[in-house]
Amino acid sequence: MKAKLFHTILLAYLTLPVACDSVSARIMEDDEKDMVDVRSAGAAAFEKMVTESVTKILNRHRGDANGIQVRRLAFVDLQNRTKEELGEWREQLIDRIQIGIDQHPAYRIVAEELVTAVLIEMGNPPVEKLLLPKPQREFAKVLEKKNSPVQFLMYGSLTRGGTVGNNERQANYLLTLRLINTATGDTDTEGAMVRKWFSK
């Protein structure tokens, strides 16, 4: 009797997840388009902004490193200036930007862990401070001491503007990248925008 009761309880336990979980999933094929998020920026918007902004700004500076064939670039921060909570997207955006830099034939990315260590050593200054000549030189000097000389710094920011209509709304997402030449202090800016339409 006890054995029969045990088997009945075990069977109920094993079948419970199947009965309660109606969610299905699959691996998307490489040629499938990203889903368009109905609440926030989402995968499709981020992919377009990263690809466009990284490619444009790096291509403009292929010859700006005093004859160095492969330039080393440190990505120092991504600021979220939208009201949306990026959550796990922030880290993935940083990774995608760094992968885009490293895949460019003229650039190599400085390891994120090393950049973090240098910024901690400098007292975690706000990223805007790196626009000033002295902090720029200090950052580059510390990296050079760690056998990782750098020719460019880059940081990014994400902003959003919204418009509301009748039963619909539009959000414009802008990813801005700023590139700093550590030898000259010159700064260049590139942005990529995605406009999203939402129905209420």
Image: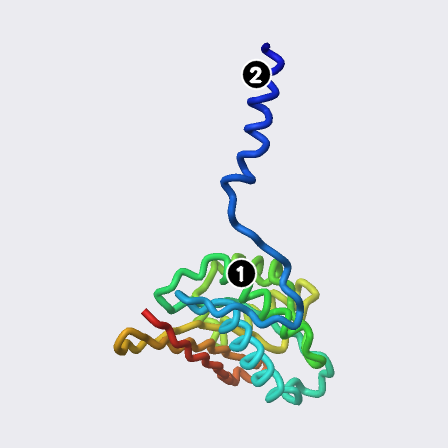
What is the distance, in whole Å, between disc 2 and disc 1 at their CAs? 50 Å
Q: Which residue is mark 1?
A: 91
Q: Position of residue 19 (x, y in %)?
A: 52, 39
Q: Residues within 10 Å of mark 1 (few under 14, many from 20)?
A: few
Of labels 2 and 1, earlier in sequence is 2
The residue lying at 35 percent from left, 65 percent from top is 83
Q: Is residue 46 left or right of residue 113?
A: left
Query: Amino acid under label 2?
Result: Leu
Relative to 104, say whether 12 is above or below. Answer: above
Q: Position of residue 182 (x, y in %)?
A: 57, 78
The residue lying at 51 percent from left, 47 percent from top is 22
Q: Which residue is mark 2?
A: 5
Which sits in the foreground, 17 or 4? 4
Q: Residues within 10 Å of mark 2 (few under 14, many from 20)?
A: few
Query: Amino acid under label 1?
Result: Glu
Which sits in the foreground, 92 or 58? 92
Q: Is residue 194 visible?
A: yes
Which sits in the foreground, 48 or 155? 48
Label annotation for residue 47: none
Q: Secondary structure at mark 1?
A: helix
**Which quadrant holds residue 95?**
bottom right
